[in-house]
Amino acid sequence: MAQSQSLNAIDPCDTIPLVEFQRCRVSSERPILAVTGVSRPSAAEGLLTIIAKLLDDAGAALERDQSTARTCIARAAALVHAERDRDHRAPAHARCALTAWQMNRLTAFIEANLGGDISIEDLTGLVRMSTGHFFRSFKRSFGEPPFSFIARRRMLRAQEMMLSTDEPLCQIALACGLCDQSHFTRVFRRVIGESPNAWRRRVTAARC
C-alpha cells in the first residue's frame, strides 16, 4: 500500500544552552546582549533575533565606534559557529531519532485511533516532518516501521478483546481497524504466528 494512504494494513523540550556572552555596549551604554540560553521550540527564532540585534547594533556603531562594531560582529559570528558546531557534534542517530515529545504524541494518537483509519499524513502532521524523514526517524526510535508498529498494536488490542469478551472475530476485526475477518486473520497470523481462532482456543484453555 502506498505510504501516502491509510496505514490500516498494518511539549516538552529541553533547554538548549547556546553560549553565554558578556554584554556588548555601544557608546550610549545600552546593553545589547545578555543571553545564557534559549528554550525550544523557539530556539531558532531566538537565535536569529539575537544575531540580527547584534548586527543592527554593529551597524549603528560602525561610524562612531569601530571597535564596538567589530566586537558585536565577532559575537554574532560566534553564535552562528557555536550553533553549527552543536549540530555537527550530535551523533547521526540522535539527529535522525524522534524526540520524546514526538514519540509520546505519536503513541497516544495511535492508541486512541486503533479502531479507525490512521494515515501517514496524520502521523507526519503530528510531528511536522516530511514523509521520508518521518519513516527514517520512526524506525530509528521505535525499532520498526510505522506500518509494523501499528499492526502490532492492533493485534495486541485484538488479543485483549479475545480474552476479555465473547465478541466474534468479525467484530473484533472491525474494532481493531481491520477491513474484515479475513484481513484480520492474515495480519494476526503474520504478527503473532498463528490464526486468531487457534490462539484464542489455546490461551483460553491454558487459563482454565
Image: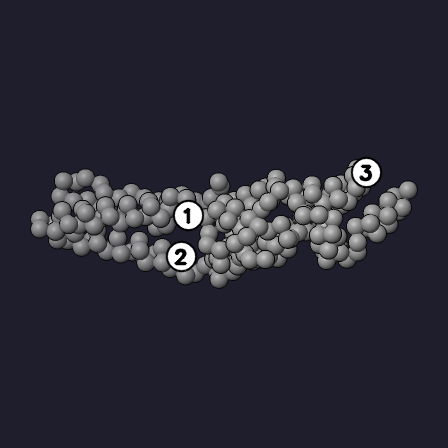
Residue at 37%, 46% in the rendered image: 43
From the viewer's perspective, is the residue at label 1 or at label 3 nearer?
A: 3
- Kindly identify which numbered label has been placed on residue 166: 3
Q: Look at the picture and state if 115 lies above or below 141.
A: above
Can residue 39 be spotted in the picture?
yes
* Rendered location of residue 79, percent (x, y): 31, 53
Is there CB contact under 8 Å for labels 3 and 2? no
Residue drawn at x 59%, y 54% as measured from the top left = 146
State the residue position of label 2. 86
Question: Do the residues bearing badges 1 and 3 touch, measured as CB atoms within 8 Å?
Answer: no
Whether tag 1 and tag 2 are in contact, CB under 8 A, the answer is yes
Sequence-earlier tag: 1 or 2: 1
Neighbours of disc 3 within 10 Å: few (<14), some (14-19), many (20+): few
Residue in view at x 8 percent, y 49 percent: 64
Helix, strand or loop status at disc 1: strand
Query: Picture quarter containing residue 191?
Result: bottom right
Nearer-N-terminus badge (1/3): 1
Q: Compute the Cα span from label 1 to label 2.
A: 10 Å
Q: Amino acid at mark 3?
A: Asp
Task: Please tell me the numbered disc located at residue 8.
Answer: none
Residue on which the image places disc 1: 16
The amino acid sitting under disc 2 is Arg
- Residue 147, given in percent of the width and then of the height, sits at 61, 54
Quadrant for the N terminus in the image: bottom right
